Image (spheres, rainbow, N blue to C red):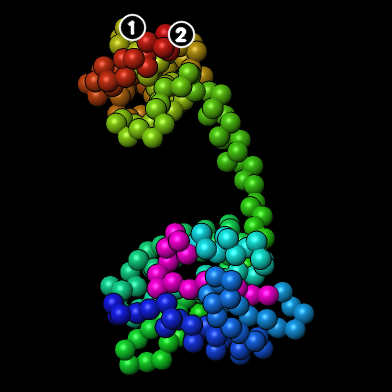
Amino acid sequence: MSSLQETDLYQPVKAFLEGQGYSVKSEISNCDVVAVRGKDEMVVVELKTAFTLPLVLQGIRRQTMTDHVYLAFAIQTGRSAKSIWRRHYRDILKLCRMLGLGLITVQFAKAAPSALEVHLDPAPYEPRKNKRRRTMLLREFHRRVGDPNEGGSTKRAIMTAYRQDALRCASFLAHGGPSRAVIVKTQTGVTRAPQILQKDHYGWFLRVERGTYTLTPNGERALNTYADIVATLE
């Protein structure tokens, strides 16, 4: 439905609001839709043929006039036409919730009247703090040696504190040969060395006998790849 216009959304939105007892008018002080009902707070709806950044920005600007601001956009029937909406539904909903904006979609079909759905009403956003994730974040921050990553870079794997500890273990085995996990732990100061060697997340270590590990070819390559990091850990 390439010929769809923003004005096509107005009548369905107006009819819905009037059904809620509102008096509705359009294009007032740059607002697409304004609805008033007695002493209730005014409602403003901004219209677009698709969910876009300009629509979000318009909604934010309207929040200086009222707390009850909705974004309304069109979706079309058919799998291909709705695929973007389906893929990003949760993200769009979360964004609007964080911004305190309401969300309305108007569905259009060739042989059927438009269908309006309110997905979200405007409300103050109060994010719940995740204490566990906060603790993990701070633990990783303090365990990580230096600042080995470049923000935004995707050239190589993120250098975590765990990977740094694994590199310490790999470096020790490269110089000392096959060793018992308890010795690696004592000599490197990596308290979780036994777990790192046993779980072998990166394929760097090989158990040669119970409690004793050696370095694999993958481990040797990792030491070359991260030679600059290893130098800061010694």
Residue 205 position by quadrant: top left
Q: Residue at x 60, y 69 (%)?
A: 69
Near mark 1 (Cα within 10 A), the count class, few <14, some 14-19 or many ≥20, is few
Depth check: 191 or 124 in front?
124
Residue 70's place in the image compared with 225, above or below, is below
What range is drawn magenta here?
Answer: 42-55
Label 1, secondary structure: give it: helix
Confirm or deny contact between disc 2 and disc 1 (CB under 8 A).
Answer: yes
Residue 43 placement (x, y as % from top left): 64, 75
Look at the picture and state if 14 lies above or below 83.
Answer: below
Give the quarter of the figure containing the C terminus.
top left
List the residue tagged with mark 1.
176
- Side of 28 where 87 appears, left or right: left
User: Which of the 4 image quadrants contains residue 173?
Assistant: top left
Which amino acid type is marked by label 2?
A: Gln
The residue where tag 2 is placed is: 187
What element does badge 2 sit on? helix
Front-most of residues 166 and 6: 6
